[in-house]
Image (tube, coloured by chain):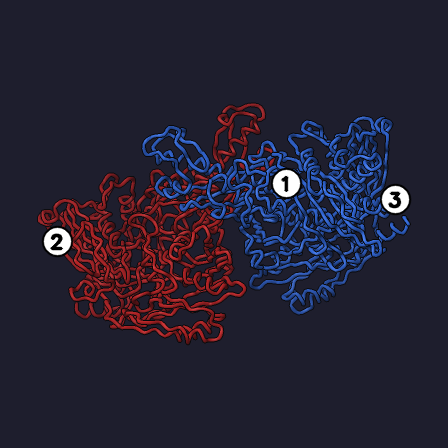
Chain colours: A red, B blue
Amino acid sequence: MSNGTFTAIGTRPVRHDGVDKVTGRANYGADLSLPGMLHAVVVRSPHAHARIRSIDASAALKVPGVKAVVTGRDVPLIDAKLGMGEGAMDLKDMSDNLLAREKALYHGHAVAAVAATTIGAAREAAALVRVEYEVLEPVLSIERAMAPDAPILHETMRTHARPAVDDKGPTNVAGRMELRRGDVEAGFAEADVVIERVFHTPTSHQGYIEPHACVARVNEDGRVSIWTSTQGPFLVRDATAMMLGLDAANVKVTPSEIGGGFGGKIPVYLEPLAVVLARQTQRPVKMVMTRDEVFRATGPTSATTIRMKMGARKDGTIVAASASLYYEAGAYRGSPSGAGAMCALAPYSIPNFFIEAYDVVVNKPKVAAYRAPGSPMAALATESLIDEIGRTLGLDQVAIRLKNAVKEGDLAPYGPPYGRIGFREVLEQVQQSAHWNSPKAAGTGRGLACGFWFNAGMSSSATVTLGADGSAAVVTGNPDIGGTRAAQALMVAEELGIPVERVRPSVADTDTAGFTEITAGSRTCYATGMAVVEASRHVREQLRARAAKMWNVPVEQTRWEHGRVVPVEAAEGRQPLTVTEIASKLAKTGGPIIGSASVNPPMAGPAFAAHICDLAVDRETGTTRVVRYTAVQDVGKAIHPSYVEGQMQGGASQGIGWALNEEYIYDAGGVMQNAGFLDYRMPVASDLPMIDTILVEVPTPGHPYGVRGVGEVPIVPPLAAVANAMADATGVRFTDLPLSPPRVLDALAQQA
Amino acid sequence: MSNGTFTAIGTRPVRHDGVDKVTGRANYGADLSLPGMLHAVVVRSPHAHARIRSIDASAALKVPGVKAVVTGRDVPLIDAKLGMGEGAMDLKDMSDNLLAREKALYHGHAVAAVAATTIGAAREAAALVRVEYEVLEPVLSIERAMAPDAPILHETMRTHARPAVDDKGPTNVAGRMELRRGDVEAGFAEADVVIERVFHTPTSHQGYIEPHACVARVNEDGRVSIWTSTQGPFLVRDATAMMLGLDAANVKVTPSEIGGGFGGKIPVYLEPLAVVLARQTQRPVKMVMTRDEVFRATGPTSATTIRMKMGARKDGTIVAASASLYYEAGAYRGSPSGAGAMCALAPYSIPNFFIEAYDVVVNKPKVAAYRAPGSPMAALATESLIDEIGRTLGLDQVAIRLKNAVKEGDLAPYGPPYGRIGFREVLEQVQQSAHWNSPKAAGTGRGLACGFWFNAGMSSSATVTLGADGSAAVVTGNPDIGGTRAAQALMVAEELGIPVERVRPSVADTDTAGFTEITAGSRTCYATGMAVVEASRHVREQLRARAAKMWNVPVEQTRWEHGRVVPVEAAEGRQPLTVTEIASKLAKTGGPIIGSASVNPPMAGPAFAAHICDLAVDRETGTTRVVRYTAVQDVGKAIHPSYVEGQMQGGASQGIGWALNEEYIYDAGGVMQNAGFLDYRMPVASDLPMIDTILVEVPTPGHPYGVRGVGEVPIVPPLAAVANAMADATGVRFTDLPLSPPRVLDALAQQA
């Protein structure tokens, strides 16, 4: 695609943080050490569901080098929420997850933490912390959780329901919500074909390479410093302060480089424990999770059960759909079932639908966000049914989707009308793509699936400074996960008309950056980018004022044009001035220039994607190999196309892994059996083909460049794309993931 | 004094960086270590003046662990200046000082640097670097330097002179300037008393506790990171980049905490060497000076010879003065002789004067700035002569000074008229002070002396961010030497009406802070403070806009009043809103708030001080003990009075040390004999009484709070105050410093 009127935006410079990262020089969460630092480890429950009768740390405290043991008694539970509305975090739950108080709610739930001068002493002591448990029956599935005789995880739990339901006493159903439109029964009555299926997806983990890690220090005056690998330094600051009853103004959080997060590094697991231990010992305290702990005690995404029914006319018009979504929340309320319900039918304009979504607690780790949380599982159901309807009716898979695709002005299933969106453009690109138009290789199947994600806006701040040499620096508060430093530098370069190599992007700590929400929700390039653009324009205003001073004219007699200040009226001695020319005179025209801006866009441009998957199944071993894969996506405007492509490739890869192999395997007692990368089978480079990408650019109105968030939607289609390709390859309609060799062999055996 | 209408300004909170500093937790220049780091040491000339014939590093390179040796050959000399006008730094000289090329110009001049895996290996190898010298006669005094047959340090040196002089060929006189007014001869003819004396002051060092130290890293892509103890991170960045031919946009400098500077941590001594070694070795390189190196190879202040003549009428009116100032520059041009000339008579309105000032190179380390550079030596001459005239005429020492004191509208000797200044108010406070009105203790003498310093403005930037909890953070680029973080926090607290404890001040690196000149010239609280106030007001503007949004009125319908936004017209639902109330709604009213500002005030309010010194001399040992000391100063407005008092006490202490004991003692070959704190005798706490302070607050017009710089002028009066007290105590007029026991005993013996 053409780069339009842009000069920097849309180019592909080497990322500014690249050399540090590829040489191993970048500092991640575990890379900081402080003089006198202690090492702390967490004592975790060996039971998935158990009442804690007593904790005896006396033996542990006798281990040489041990300086402190903390338990739930050291951190009073607070009843508070962080943030507003639906997105608010329940800090009481987060705190109880941090350290179990009354009950251990999953295998691996923290019950105590031990700080010692060496990691060895800390581990030795942790093994000596004696916890007396009353073991309870674990609740390990949605079915069991919702059974009338199910053990109850939280005696105080009532269902948060919209519409409201009568208080039925203790329950494991944390929430229920509904969406509806039209008359579903009448709709199904109109349909020529109606298909209903039940889908199951397993618990799967984000699989970030870097485990959670932090160092905390507490000064004698109570000031707290935390270094941590997080998606949200301000969130860590505020959540830690609130959970511990500190003034957030006394807490400084410095984000390290982050080795992946995908939503999983939003919750707070270690930092308050490290602060409490540091406060007790007056020593810095470091905590680093093992991979085993990351699997057992941080938030994967929900396992789900989805029953969906869809009806269509012979021409492919979908006339009705109904769905019941059940999402595991893990040990505390808060699965993305609501998001799943809102996303499930979002790409299609369906006159009659009913969706209900349940948030169900079970004795597994509390789920965390995972890239477009809740949407991929819902899309598996929707896109599998459309695929099946298309096959049943003999319709082209692109055509049936185009017939039903939402367009500007259509109401989203969750309420408001869509603005300018690019779903039809995405489908048209699929239709024209080399991949879609190529013949399938012998023995392969091909599947198509689409996906939707909202994308987020939220609060962001940025500062842009200009040097006398005409170079610039930009400072924000978002840990750089997907190349946002490079994107921000490109925006400054674009706005100021200077080379991107001369823009220095920095991620600052919470005392230095303006308040900025988490790096998540595909919001960083969008919302923080808007702040960067605004801050750059604040610099431009000042450049105009300086040029006006140099020409001795009112500022209104200047205008900005292609990286220069230009006089409105040409006159003697008024040649257009570049940024570098104005910068070289800063000291004489009023001093340095610094620009700043903050934004809080209420909405962002939604993202749509369509993926094409070709795969081959080895009928002897049941092994499935993706042989060709193309991701097509409306990205609004690609600031740095390589990193947009990287997001699309990364999301597709994670989705393919989820579809084919990844799953938490539990024993009957609720103990995860595969808590390591040898047994939890994520795809590695050799497992996948190059993921091809097609970028569609339908700009988001209201954003200066039309950016859409791009990081999440690429994980939405792959589950269904793989399942649909499997149906094409084998004739078997798989509804349960993962499509691992044993399940595939079983299905093929039944088929035979 | 009353705090006027201020709430935060003028209070004395504990400094924000205090706990880290008193617990030893703060990180100074030598506290950073990086993985794989090398240690580098400098090979220094054993001769004060010598031509370098050859350097052979082959033996050094064979020492196990040695990775690189650099000499002048590795760093081409550039012909460039950093900055503009008089204050510009000559980077060619700075570079030649960094590593001698043709000649070693002082004992300790760097000729090579060695990097090795351990400091031991580096030292061993440094001793093996073979340098062949042709030893030249060293020039060790102004007299010798200006003698017709003197050896010439720089064959290319010509005198920078105003008025211009004919080119007389090679010279050691780097510069000469004149100031004049009226008719000096006619003035002296009018005088009833004329006194002329010649004064000598020795080379003395700032004596900062922390030696120079840095770590440099060079990435594979050429990006450079430097951590260093400096007064000017942006200066280190720009000077290093220019000397090494790098793009400053690729250099990031992070200032460490700084253990004192007083002007001596403005020049660049180590950083470019560390960068060159890091580039050659592809390893981080650390350099830390020893105390010996600090004395021998960093910039002390000038030794001086000042001949001054002053004439007055019987009533004390000074009618004429003439002075010849000779300041040693050390090995390269750039003594503060010009500043000395401008300050010498600045406190007094004298109708006829002539001053000439010489900048003279000698074979000693290049001088650096030292607190009010050049002014204390000049004040020694001026204030000694006024003291002697006062005694001769039988006039009160305050009265004679008040009679001649400059006031608003008087022309400064260097040109412009004074604005609002507080010298008379200072003298009136002396007159009313308990100290001045107390009887002298038996056996003690009392001296009074005054002093002047310009104070600087220059470029500064600041960012202020507001949190949703109503707390704020302020970010600047000035290393915090004298409590500027606390002062900046007070300014933000004042502007926003929030507690100072809830303001978090940070010193940021050059990629994060807006461009800001050095922490020097008493400019930080003044100019950077102005930027902080402006940035806070930028926040206030936004707070008004948010309040307007909350009230649904135009912003013009709001005003700021005592830390709140108040509706211009009272109405239902429009109660005044505090910052905290508005902050709690930020997410709903448009997102976070960030304010920024930069300033470049052309001038600052000049500072005047008067010190009273009581001392006792032990006639047997020659030991002098200051028994009472009061510093009175016009501080404009004391933001944090304790730290203003601390500056006054620190400056007075340094001045007393300079007056009584401090001096570089050289042997005939130009080798310093006392390069350590045991032999270079700085006063310690037990040597001094508590320094009393009286703060006079005559606001500087144009500054939002009327701040004047306060850090430098307190070192100006002590030399003369001590000498005048000595004259009072002993009847001997001392004109040569220091007043060390041998010199005092000699004088007393001659008197007897």
Same chain for marks 3 and 1?
yes
Which residue is at the front of the view, A60 or B89? A60
Q: In the drawing, does residue B595 fall left or right of residue B350?
A: left
Identified at 61% across, 61% down, the residue is: B281
Q: Residues within 10 Å of mark 3 (few under 14, many from 20)?
A: few
Which residue is at the front of the view, B264 or A673? B264
Q: Quadrant of residue A677?
A: bottom left
The picture places residue A665, in percent across and down from the top left corner, at: 28, 69
Residue A360 is marked as: none
Q: Chain letter for mark 3, please.
A: B
Q: Amino acid at mark 1?
A: Leu
Measure the C-alpha gap from mark 2 to mark 3: 110 Å
The picture places residue A460, in percent across and down from the top left corner, at: 41, 45
Q: Can you tell which of label 2 and label 3 is closer to the viewer?
A: 3
Q: Quadrant of residue A61?
A: bottom left
**Residue A163 visible in the picture:** yes
Tag 1 secondary structure: strand
Q: Amino acid at mark 3?
A: Ala
Residue B695 is marked as: 1
Q: Is residue B207 above or below residue A737?
A: above
Identified at 56% across, 50% down, the residue is: B252
Q: Can you tell which of label 1 and label 2 is closer to the viewer?
A: 1
Q: Can you tell which of label 3 and label 1 is closer to the viewer?
A: 1
Q: Read off the residue under disc 3.
A: B147
Q: Chain letter for mark 1, please.
A: B
Measure the C-alpha gap from mark 1 to mark 2: 89 Å
Which residue is at the front of the view, A223 or A439? A223
Q: Read off the residue under disc 2.
A: A194
Q: Residues within 10 Å of mark 1 (few under 14, many from 20)?
A: many
